[in-house]
Amino acid sequence: MNAADFYSLAPLLILAGGATILMLQIAFRRDIKLTSALTVATLVAAAFSIIGADDNVPRFVTPLLRADHLALVFSGLFCLAAAVTSILSIDYLRQRGDEPEEFFLLLILSTLGACVLAYAAHLASLLLGLELMSISLYALIAYPDKTKLPLEAAIKYLVLSGAATATMLFGFALLYGTTGTMQFAAMGDQLVDAHAGSAVLLVAAVMVVSGLGFKLSLVPFHMWTPDVYDGAPAPVTGFLASVSKAAVFVALLRWFLASDLFRFDILIDSISLLAIFSMLAGNILALLQSNIKRMLAYSSIAHMGYLVIILVVGSNMDNRALAIEAGMYYLIAYTVTTIAAFGLLTLLSSEGHHRENVQLHDVSGLFWHQPLYASLMMVALLSLAGIPLTAGFIAKFYLISAAVSDFRWVLLGSLVVGSGIGIYYYLRVIFYMTRKVEEHNNNPVAPGGWLVKAVSCALIASILLLGTVPQPLMEYLRSILQVVN
Amino acid sequence: MMETLFYLAAVIALSATILALTRANAAHALIYLILSLLAVAVLFFLMGAPFAAALEILIYAGAIMVLFVFVIMMLNLGKSGEELERSGLHARNWIIPGIMATLLFVELMYAVEQTSSLTSGTAVSPKEVGLELFGPYVLAVELASMLLLAGLVGAYHLGRRFIVRSGSDD
């Protein structure tokens, strides 16, 4: 490895170094202020290191990692999302758990895993990134260990996610057995050679798709999602819903692009089936929830359903560039929006004792006494629903135009029906928030210093900016895609 | 001949795993699990991966299983534990695992004695594994170390409440 290799891996190196420093700092002196400041500094430094790394890509760094613009953009996004999560969770953690410092260490390690997934060019790095992210998440979910709900959620996630990883690993073994390579770039052509009537490959594909489908919580692999989201502490849920999903999807996208998996019709057909189920089931189940976290869990299932459409649309060579561009835009918009929505739930629960304030009536009348945080939630929900002027609208518009240009009417129909149902349950939360003050009895007081307020404003601004001035980001994504392809 | 050995070890691995799953007694299940891991190690050896075979025995059948045994022993304190230990000495409880382990041992001895004990492919020596791991795959080693750090910190945090601190109790 030479200097350029190291530069191109800058985000990973900074995160790993930051984790080591943080570990030593916690060992010498427990101080949540110092730890959280170090964490945010590490994450922001890692996010901005992508600017310096920009000149040294694209390149393969060992067979495991491929450093290109796609990897850098998403590493930066994940680091910023983690930084926002850690800023918003400081007050939450002060209320719960007597040793809150390791939370930040685990958060950095989980982000490192997510960034490795963004760089993955090899089955081994895919697996290692996935496991690094998930193992940190198991501990993060169970972090406030005074109540039973987080522990239950963590055990469920541990067992099911472990089973999913084992299934996927078996699939990898079969893939390696038939193709003789674990590198994405070399695997595609080998797969075509071995394709003719190979039952082994079919089994391998089923295993890998179900493993990754579990991680993306696509229907029918979604059963864990509401329980885990509900039980996990609110900041972790936000991280789990945004960064971990986006990272897995980026890795999947890289695999599809590098091996050109778009040419296997059975794979594409089964993915479109998963997409339709996820879009419809996710939205319909979300209708029935009165717990906002569970509602967002089901809505995230639906959003993953929308997102995998782009893998189907990408199977047509003419529309591939548009589809990938739409997918990347959607991922960015979805990550920002989800972090914002769960950010509000974190703030609401920061003053609570052990119970989290995540029922619909907990946000009742919020708009009248906490206008800033209520606006944050409102903008996030409008964006998830896909209302114009927000990031979600442009993202969905992008997705629909990609689906239309490829004549995928069934997928498009499910998307439209799903979004229509979605508007009802998103707007219901907003309706509760704008109720008159007299109508609600409890008074959740969200705390927060200037930093939390600044982060909330930044989140609102970025959602609105992505929704009103999308051109710069679109242009940038288009320019890096040409390099990636 | 080597093929026969391979299938014999595979049958032992499968049947030991099934027995491990169906035993009601945790200690008995554990014995079968260890056997299953030993059989897998023999399979690795016969397929030309002596290093993986050694690791399988050292780490899985050795270190991890010893931890399991410790946990089960600590859970089975008192009268019932004593009865359990006594029942473990009955011939019907150890005769099948004993036969399986002896078979595996004889197989391994035979395979080691042969000049070429491969069923397929080429043998990969520990040196080659090391060169690969610390050559092209060095980042995987680093990532795995971060993975272990995450596991360690998580386990520390979650297990912390069971640690009795000196000073806090008295």
Image: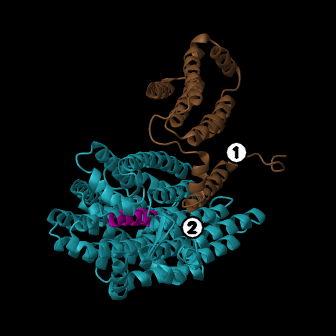
Chain colours: A cyan, B brown
A101 above or below B54? below
Q: Which of these two is toward me, A276 or A368?
A: A276
**Identity, as a three-letter code, of the amino acid under mark 1:** Phe
Mark seen at residue B162: 1
Q: Give above or below for B64 relative to A120.
A: above
Which residue appears at 38% of the width and 78% of the height? A379
Q: Residues within 10 Å of mark 2 (few under 14, many from 20)?
A: many
Q: Nearer the viewer, residue B60 or A326?
A: B60
Label 2 chain ID: A
Q: Residue A394's image quarter?
A: bottom left
Magenta span: chief secondary structure: helix
Which mark is on residue A88?
A: none
Quadrant (top left/top right/bottom left/bottom right) for the C terminus of chain A: bottom left
**Left or right: A357 with respect to A181?**
right
Q: Are marks 2 and 1 on the same chain?
A: no
Residue A411 percent coordinates (x, y) = 20, 63
Q: Which residues are magenta?
A: A241-258
Chain letter of mark 1 equals B
Query: Residue B9's x, y, as percent?
Result: 49, 27
Q: Quadrant of residue A380?
A: bottom left
Lateral position of residue A426 relative to residue A350, left or right:
left
- Residue A389 appears in the figure: yes
Return the mark for residue A350. 2
Quarter occupied by the N terminus of chain A:
bottom right
